[in-house]
Image: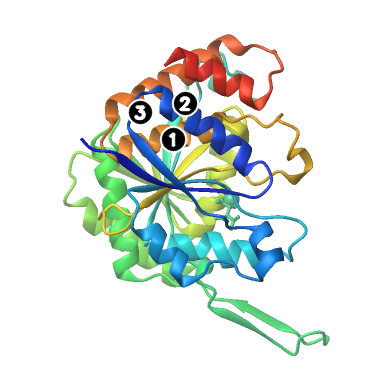
Amino acid sequence: SGTLDLAVIGGDGIGPEVVAEALKVLSATGVDASTTDYDLGATRWHATGETLPDSVVEEIRGHDAILLGAIGDPSVPSGVLERGVLLPLRFALDHYVNLRPAKLYPGVTSPLADHVTSKGLDFVVVREGTEGPYVGNGGALRVGTPHEIATETSVNTRFGVERVVRDAFARAQARPRQHLTLVHKHNVLTHAGHLWRRTVEEVGAEFPDVETAYQHVDAATIFLATDPARFDVIVTDNLFGDIITDIAAAVAGGIGLAASGNINPTGAAPSMFEPVHGSAPDIAGQGTADPTAAILSASLLLAHVGRADEAARVEAAVATDLAERGDRVRSTSEIGDAVAARI
Ligand code: IPM
Ligand code: MN
């Protein structure tokens, strides 16, 4: 296998710091990788007013995969970078599977230790990544008046729902428990709910080994917080998935450990791997951010590009580091060094 050609987007806040550690660990695996940095985020916006020029999307498209730190900064109006950089990348590269594993590693204390430690916690959320309320289909009328109206229409297409549901079934089929839970809110969102339920039922016929369940999103938050061991694979829409993966990260030991992949399973465009956490401007530049989520995202990246062996070695090195870290306070680069040394 040849050189892995990576696009690297450090982004804002702690993004570049944690990405540097992920690259350190990646290089410790011996994978032959070349990296190209793309300067996107607040700095570029302040300097040029640009968010994500089309020419940059086209350059990024040519790489094998993308490693991203974080996008978002308080010096930029809310939504400008999210809607201008992160979401357009996910949409343009058709990252319809937003894969967010939640796993409680030995030695990591969950805030719900009493609930989860005995049973463990190891599930994965397949969050739809290109539709739902994220499409920007909305508008405002009579802004600033007492009769202001704001709408954000959730768009769910049969094509979009079916492809993510099929991917989730395939992932469930490949896991020991072979269980898939659809999370939605069909008692209120009847149109989209009906489409999602019917699609799960129909695609499920292709996966007779996979047992399915359904939960309304509000009830799902209770079980995620009290009995997460019941979940194996969860499939859900873009916004519900955004919300429940923060809960999932919290119960699995904190947002500093949560990794994700924005995946285009067709391979028609590169997939993008990023920690679930944001740019954490309050601690940026201090060298105190935990790079573990970024390192685990690099492990997901390696698995995606067919380097299963190296991916497993990175995950194992993180697991050992977590098991032995205790309450020690280490800097960003100390954690990166320690994990790299265990590869
Ligand atoms: C995430 C983030 C993004 C999202 C924001 C920054 C647009 O919260 O990756 O979960 O909502 O998807
Ligand atoms: Mn989020």
The residue located at (53%, 78%) in the rendering is 137
Across the whole image, how many numbered discs are drawn on residues? 3
> Taking 257 as reference, is 141 above or below it?
below
What is the crowding at mark 1: few (fewer than 14 residues within 10 Å), some, or many (at least 20)? many
User: Which residue does the numbered mark 2 point to in the structure image?
Assistant: 25
Q: Position of residue 162 (x, y in %)?
A: 29, 61
* Image quadrant containing the C terminus: top left
Please identify the quarter of the rendering in which residue 276 is found. top right
- Tell me if I can see residue 131 in this picture: no
Q: Is residue 154 left or right of residue 174?
A: right
Cα separation between marks 1 and 3: 8 Å
User: Which residue does the numbered mark 3 point to in the structure image?
Assistant: 311
Q: Nearer the viewer, mark 1 or mark 2?
A: 2
Q: Position of residue 133 (x, y in %)?
A: 53, 68
Pick the residue in front: 337 or 208: 337
Q: Position of residue 292 (x, y in %)?
A: 55, 28
Query: Tag 1: residue type?
Result: Ala
What is the crowding at mark 2: few (fewer than 14 residues within 10 Å), some, or many (at least 20)? many
- Tell me if I can see residue 125 in this picture: yes
Which of the marked residues, 1 or 3, is nearer the chain's N terminus?
1
Q: Nearer the viewer, mark 3 or mark 2?
A: 2
Q: Position of residue 278 (x, y in %)?
A: 64, 46
C-beta proximity under 8 Å, tags 1 and 2? yes
